[in-house]
Amino acid sequence: INEAVKYGQSVEFRNNQPHLFEKLNECELVVINGEGTLHGEQADGANGILALISAAKANGKQTYVINHSVFPDDTAQHSKLDLPYAHALRLADGIAARDPFSGDFYSRNGIPYTESFDCLPVFIKERYQSLLTGNFLATADKPVVISSGVSMSPESFRQLLTLVIKRYGNLRKIVYL
């Protein structure tokens, strides 16, 4: 886990992931959907997310981790893996964990967090009017970045893309991660 954090800030990672760093340079901030990934010592998903947090912060980007549970040793109990996970997650500017067990992890490691659930309904409720009027982070010089989970079907993506194009037309570059 500590190696993932170091790797995220390394020249080797930058050289191996030029596309990722190009996207990091284009965006205003990074929001990471941690769903199903922040658990286990050898978990590729956890290591990837922790490296991404580290890379984004090394590039001066505000970074948020949302919609996740964190179980370093695959249980809700304190473990030797708390420290390396906490080291990486402490770099994030904001954390929204979706269960009280993950909240216990953040509390015992002194990391501020918000307990939430799947954040999209909350986001829509809070931002609905500004989304309708176009007053939410709407600047023509920044791209619309779309990131989805592995479960998004091609048809769902087409529907989402249609809505984005309808809303922004040709005013924005659309980036799909």
Image (cartoon, rainbow, N blue to C red):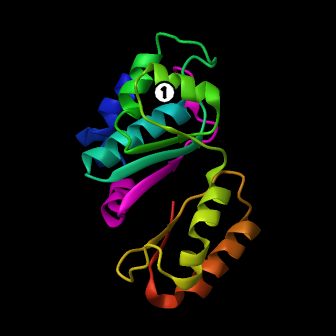
Who's the residue at 63% across and 65% down the image?
124
In which quadrant is the N terminus drawn?
A: top left
Q: Nearer the viewer, residue 158 or 69?
A: 69
Who's the residue at 51% across and 82% down the image?
134
Res. 39 in view: no
| Residue 151 placement (x, y as % from top left) | 72, 52
Q: Residues within 10 Å of mark 1 (few under 14, many from 20)?
A: many
Q: Nearer the viewer, residue 45 or 93?
A: 93
Vertical arrangement, residue 168 with respect to residue 95, above or below: below
Who's the residue at 37% across and 75% down the image?
142
Q: Which residues are magenta?
A: 18-42
State how many labels appear: 1
| Residue 129 placement (x, y as % from top left) | 59, 77
Find residue 20 and report its image quarter: bottom left
| Circle 1 residue | 106
Who's the residue at 66% across and 81% down the image?
162
Q: Nearer the viewer, residue 173 or 110?
A: 110
| Residue 90 placement (x, y as % from top left) | 37, 33
Q: Nearer the viewer, residue 166 or 15?
A: 166
| Residue 119 placement (x, y as % from top left) | 62, 52
Vertical arrangement, residue 158 with respect to residue 176, above or below: below
Whether residue 27 appears in magenta in the rendering, the answer is yes
Vertical arrangement, residue 164 with respect to residue 109, above or below: below
Whether residue 112 appears in magenta in the rendering, the answer is no
Seen from this angle, which residue lies furthest bottom? 170
Q: Amino acid at mark 1?
A: Tyr
Res. 80 in view: yes
Find residue 143 and report its image quarter: bottom left
Q: Secondary structure at mark 1?
A: helix
Vertical arrangement, residue 154 with respect to residue 75, above or below: below
